[in-house]
Image: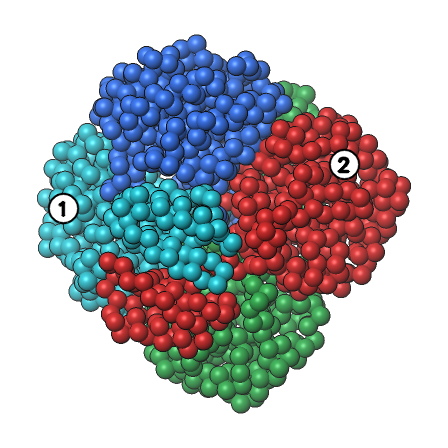
Chain colours: A red, B green, C blue, D cyan
């Protein structure tokens, strides 16, 4: 931690800061510039983080030097990239993964039909929500246990591993019975007890960025999972909240190269929720692949106009194969190795 | 729902929209302007909300007309304001409430000493967290059950009702044993299962606005509690996330008059978390009272420089009485009836 | 304009709104829903826009129906796309354009050397600023007239048309002597007198989105140019301001497909300013092309580490040809016709 | 400037950074922590600001230590507060100033009638725009020269000094003939040539914060005026752009205490534009005074329902005296000395 003093801070003020730093068992290194004095506090990370010097007399501001996450940092793996293997499908490093399926599990038929199409078009994982966090208490909240059963059936029939969302610590066991990858939604990115449970489960986790979470906060959320010994975390950019109202969220694709510098974990993009409209999903999917993402997770439906939830943003199954092929072509230009279908 | 067609939308496109509206059992009212056709869809609220016409050929955009919340709306109580009575302390309507105490329950002594001071200075409720949502898994996570016991002791000694946070559905019973008001933190504003459990408990709830939640989303979260039959909800503005980095959050005081128009529920302000520094907490507390808030919830500590958590933003106990008196003076100018201490 | 009344609005309140609408010479169409009455105001666009009914008794909110821009709208050209021809180089429709060069004109040598490289690598236009808007009054403000002279020389030597920024209405003549395309920077997007002067000049304009401008405001700014009879406007997304501090700005690539739906004007992307670092400029350039942009404007420098301004984000000349080729490959996947170099 | 190296940065990388720092004539101070090395670059402010080390091998990020503004900083005046005297009316330090009048000068009668009322209610300055920056080229753009004449007449009749906006460097002389305070609007906060001209004029300036400007950028804009030798700058918070759409802008009242710490210049608040509705203007005015503002600038109109521009947010003249009195009562609680009317 660096403590930047105000111009003209008095020796007494500087002395008080030094005393405070030393009182938590840290060392204080004073650098006296022409105008400004900077005090470096070196010692135990947590103690230093809690110095409480904001607003102290003579203190201008504090600058943290160490990143607050450790296990998620690129340095922790010495810049080697984590590759996850999900029932034989790889993501991370040179591997690009396409995850596709309906937003919600609405019915057995929709799920199975969609699953077959996305598998045949080269998708590696099947997505579908049995539990849905909905802004309105009056909206469809998902089929729950029945939805999980349909997912199991789709897995058995198509051979596709399953990604599905966990919303409640009480549902951990039920979801783990089916999920090859446990999705933690944007609204639950800082539901720390839920993160901890997923960490303890050891199951691969797909952690979506909260809609106003900084990259650092996303990595801190990943850290909650990692510190339980679960190294299998996929990060997902899905759009952030900004002033622009022309779309539902602002897809923040700079997060892709930035996260790939900060962390060893794979980074994917959900182009569906930000766009909110299928004609904008394809350009954003191509853009995600171009930006260097390790994969995409996209909503597909065999009858989007009949979908209970988010139909307008679903890619219809009959154009999915073309769509997926174009995404792969761009991913190749961006440097990914791809097995052509 | 109004469906605004693009300029030059064809009769076929208009016809397709009308057919879609009617297919969900709603009525379509066509208004043909000089340039643009607008189609009103009138019928069951949920069906109409799920028309899925975004991106339909010829559709420009959709405009919802009905507010998505019902029980939280001012109209639901015909503009009468809800007044909560918490063990004899009132909030809402003409009543201004001061809630004060340490951020976290750190120790029995800090809690008891701070509680006595805030009670003597006229605070009506005692706040203090036993469970703390922390960005870092390496930070102090609260004393848990032991913290709840200290709160119980403080309640018994000072007579102050208790506000404390619930983070996990598994802790409902333990928290309800002590809490007169259950706090739902900003990170959990959209933890719907938690909201539902608090709704079912019937216990007064203090619901903090998520840091990128719109007022509408805040009211939808309140609706999850209200629809379980629990009418005792206090809303709390605590700062939103914006581009400005000179403070931790941007305290959005326009939310106060805006919420007071939209809803009958009491609206309070937490000035501590946005400011992050105690010298900015007082101006923001006065501003909250001036804006018409029904109360404030503020962090107070008897030894802020020793606090484990958020010490820099705590008001020291030795200046709290003056602070609280000034807040009340401003609340009176803004129209509140106040019992002077 | 639709005026949505509050639930329970009285007949008198509805009558007062109708009277207000009719007082400006517009017609009022009343739609009575089960819960809510909506009043459509149909008539002269400007009169209707200035009804001033916000906050009227019984009025909930107003919803504009017509877009506030006309000449910039896609409908104005019946969904035909505008193609600009700049000294033989085309942009818009199927044509992808690469604009490259140094941020600032610093010296004759840097400019000429960089210009040759970008031309040989297939860039169609040369960029470079003689007048620079700088946040600090103590920073280098550009070479001014001398910079314009160097640009003229580079044009003569390389044959590349010039894009350069205009900041001040008093510099119109000097800039028009050299500029084939006049750039209007993000900070001047709402400098309406400057827009009007560029409109009157008839010269092609490159209009950058302000860093907190909505797409609608960007199109309204374009409208200031178009309404003077100048149809040659290129829009440019260059990053918006959000809460994220991991990069300078958040590049908003959803703006590309959204603008391409709203307007007939070409849309390009500046990947350099948002990224702020050259290793993030390439992924964002590929992403822009993938999103369907009509071109990119990118900073290139032959000695970036010596650059006076924004060196860290400049692509070095020695890797520019490879970079430009990859961008074109992605643009082709996204549907552009490209002349290979 | 502090350069924070990545964990595991090599000695060669550290050496290269040191060499770069020394190449601009600055000194490099190396602090080796357990995990991370920090290099302080000490020397000429501008040289150090342009090191261009972002993205250098081994560099994690750069932290500026010195504030980029000098003349605007609180330290420059050793924490003494600037008090402006505008034709005998004081603002700053203990003085609270009320500036009131119509948004736009629409007609002689409206202006004169409104001016008399606000003067009698204790307003110290009269506001009114002759030149109006309007989002739409089709909206009323102000009366221009004729508007300035009406302002002159109002000044002569009421004795109130005038605040009016300057939008174009070509209008400097005309505006200076009438304006006692030259307003620089939010859209022109970074119109640097305009700032410089106002600086040169020596006339007091009212500088509005751009709607996505940080406090630092606002102070940098003030610096453009100050460095021309004009010390008479009033800063104005008028609402920032955020994700919330329930109001036009988010009034950022934390800016008041934060600016009062950062700078010696007076800080006022415009509550009208953010609220956009008169019933929300009063709570925000009281909140501004409570937050410690040095004044408010508020829109008042004698016939708001007939106003050409922004009528819904104007305080009607017949309630202005009460409004102004309440604002003063709150300002007194917040520590201002006020001459009662």
Instruction: Say whether mark 1 and mark 2 are on the same chain.
Output: no
The residue identified by callout 2 is A123
Nearer to us in this view, A248 or D129 = A248
Q: Is mark 2 on a helix, strand or loop?
A: loop
Q: Is residue B269 above or below residue C220?
A: below
Q: Where is residue A286 in the image (x, y as percent from the top left)?
A: 63, 31
D158 vs A293, left or right, is: left
D67 vs D158, left or right, is: right
Q: Residue at x 53, y 70 (%)?
A: B83
Total residue callouts: 2
Chain hosting mark 1: D
Nearer to us in this view, C207 or B200 = C207
The residue identified by callout 1 is D229
Q: Is residue D320 above or below residue A21?
A: above
Q: Which residue is drawn at 43% across and 63% down?
A: A1
Q: Residue at x 43, y 53 (%)?
A: D4
Nearer to us in this view, C237 or D167 = C237
């Amino acid at each position: 931690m660096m403590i930047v003093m105000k111009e003209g801070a008095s020796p007494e003020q500087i002395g008080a800061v030094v005393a405070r730093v030393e009182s938590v068992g840290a060392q204080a290194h004073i650098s006296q510039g022409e105008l400004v004095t900077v005090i470096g506090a070196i010692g135990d990370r947590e103690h230093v983080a809690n110095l409480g010097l904001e607003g102290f007399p003579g203190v201008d501001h504090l600058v943290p030097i160490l990143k607050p996450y450790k296990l998620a940092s690129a340095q922790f793996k010495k810049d080697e990239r984590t590759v996850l293997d999900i029932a034989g499908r790889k993501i991370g490093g040179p591997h690009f993964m396409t995850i596709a399926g309906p937003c919600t599990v609405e019915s057995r038929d929709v799920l199975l039909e969609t699953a077959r199409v996305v598998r045949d078009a080269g998708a590696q994982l099947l997505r579908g929500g049995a539990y849905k966090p909905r802004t309105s208490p009056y909206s469809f909240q998902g089929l729950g246990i029945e939805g999980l059963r349909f997912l199991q059936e789709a897995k058995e029939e198509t051979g596709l591993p399953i990604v599905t969302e966990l919303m409640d610590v009480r549902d951990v066991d039920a979801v783990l019975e089916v999920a090859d990858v446990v999705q933690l939604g944007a609204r639950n990115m800082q539901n720390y007890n839920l993160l901890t449970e997923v960490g303890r489960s050891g199951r691969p986790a797909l952690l979506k960025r909260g809609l106003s979470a900084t990259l650092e906060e996303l990595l801190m959320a990943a850290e909650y999972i990692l510190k339980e010994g679960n190294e299998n975390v996929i990060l997902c950019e899905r759009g952030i909240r900004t002033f622009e109202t022309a779309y539902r969220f602002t897809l923040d694709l700079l997060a892709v190269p930035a996260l790939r510098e900060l962390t060893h974990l794979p980074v994917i993009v959900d182009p569906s929720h930000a766009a909110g409209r299928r004609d904008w999903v394809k350009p954003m999917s191509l853009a995600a692949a171009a930006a260097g993402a390790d994969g995409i997770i996209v909503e597909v439906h065999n009858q989007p106009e009949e979908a209970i939830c988010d139909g307008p943003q679903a890619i219809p199954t009959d154009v999915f194969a073309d769509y997926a092929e174009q995404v792969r072509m761009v991913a190749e230009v961006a440097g990914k190795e791809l097995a052509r279908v």
